[in-house]
């Protein structure tokens, strides 16, 4: 049995957690056990000593990739929800997983303006006010993935369709990249 890890990447507010929750619910309803690696939760438990410098962000994503690879090695399914703003770190995570199974990169390409308008955590407002000095999309870059298996703009694609597209990409059905 080959395991699979899905990395949902994009700006804060792009829909990573929303899609993760719906995807995991569907997978578990179908009998698939799923390990979820949420960027915020991993930072609390596995990377609590890290800040938000590029080096620390990259290390956090490498750690997530390593853990995902360990789960995939044993045939497991992993869903990762992380901003993961830098290409090199995403590719390092891919390499760690692909030693053992499949890696599917899903870029939530929701425009920054839409994500900022959602601002469910109030983070963009704090970043614009200078309270958060390193914030992806405002004061820190987001490198658009080069090798995404799938791109989904959650401002245009309904949740059920986005989940169906991710599931198809996980199954390796067709050419999902857009």
Image (cartoon, rainbow, N blue to C red):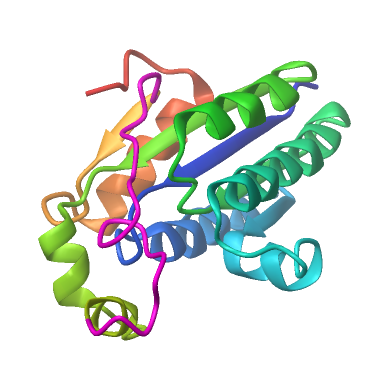
User: Is 133 covered by the magenta stretch?
Assistant: yes
Q: Compare residues 109 and 85 and report the one nearer the observer.
A: 85
| Residue 42: x %, y % from top left | 70, 63
Q: Position of residue 178 (x, y in %)?
A: 21, 23
- Region in magenta: 129-148
Up-down: is 45 above or below 103? below
Q: Is residue 3 above or below residue 37?
A: above
Residue 143 within the segment the image draws in magenta: yes
Q: Main secondary structure of the magenta part?
A: loop
Say if 61 sits above or below 52 in the image: above
Q: Is residue 57 above or below residue 147?
A: below
Quadrant of the image containing the N terminus: top right
Residue under the image location 62 percent in, 45 percent down: 55
Q: Is residue 96 left or right of residue 175?
A: right
The image quarter in which residue 72 lies: top right
Residue at 11 percent across and 62 percent down: it is 113
Which residue: 61% across, 43% down?
A: 58
Residue 131 in picture, x, y percent from top left: 36, 85
Q: Please name the residue shown 72% across and 26% down the image.
A: 97
Relative depth, front residue between 174 and 15: 15
Residue 156 percent across, percent down from the top left? 11, 51
**Residue 61's quadrant in the figure?**
top right
* Count of numbered circles on the image: 0
């Amino acid at each position: 049995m080959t395991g699979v890890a899905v990395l949902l990447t994009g700006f804060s507010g792009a829909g990573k957690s929303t899609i993760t929750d719906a995807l995991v619910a569907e997978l578990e309803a179908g009998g698939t056990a799923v390990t979820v690696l949420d960027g915020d939760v991993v930072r609390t438990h596995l990377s609590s000593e890290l800040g938000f410098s590029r080096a620390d962000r990259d290390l956090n994503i490498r750690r997530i990739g390593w853990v995902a690879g360990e789960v995939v090695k044993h045939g497991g399914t992993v869903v990762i929800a992380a901003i993961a703003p830098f290409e090199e770190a995403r590719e390092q995570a891919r390499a760690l997983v692909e030693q053992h199974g499949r890696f599917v990169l899903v870029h939530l390409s929701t425009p920054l303006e839409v994500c900022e308008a959602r601002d469910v955590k109030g983070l963009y407002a704090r970043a614009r006010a200078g309270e958060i000095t390193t914030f992806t999309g405002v004061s820190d870059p987001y490198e658009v993935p080069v090798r995404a298996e799938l791109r989904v703009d959650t401002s245009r694609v309904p949740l059920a369709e986005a989940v169906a597209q991710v599931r198809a990409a996980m199954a390796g059905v067709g050419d999902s990249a857009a």
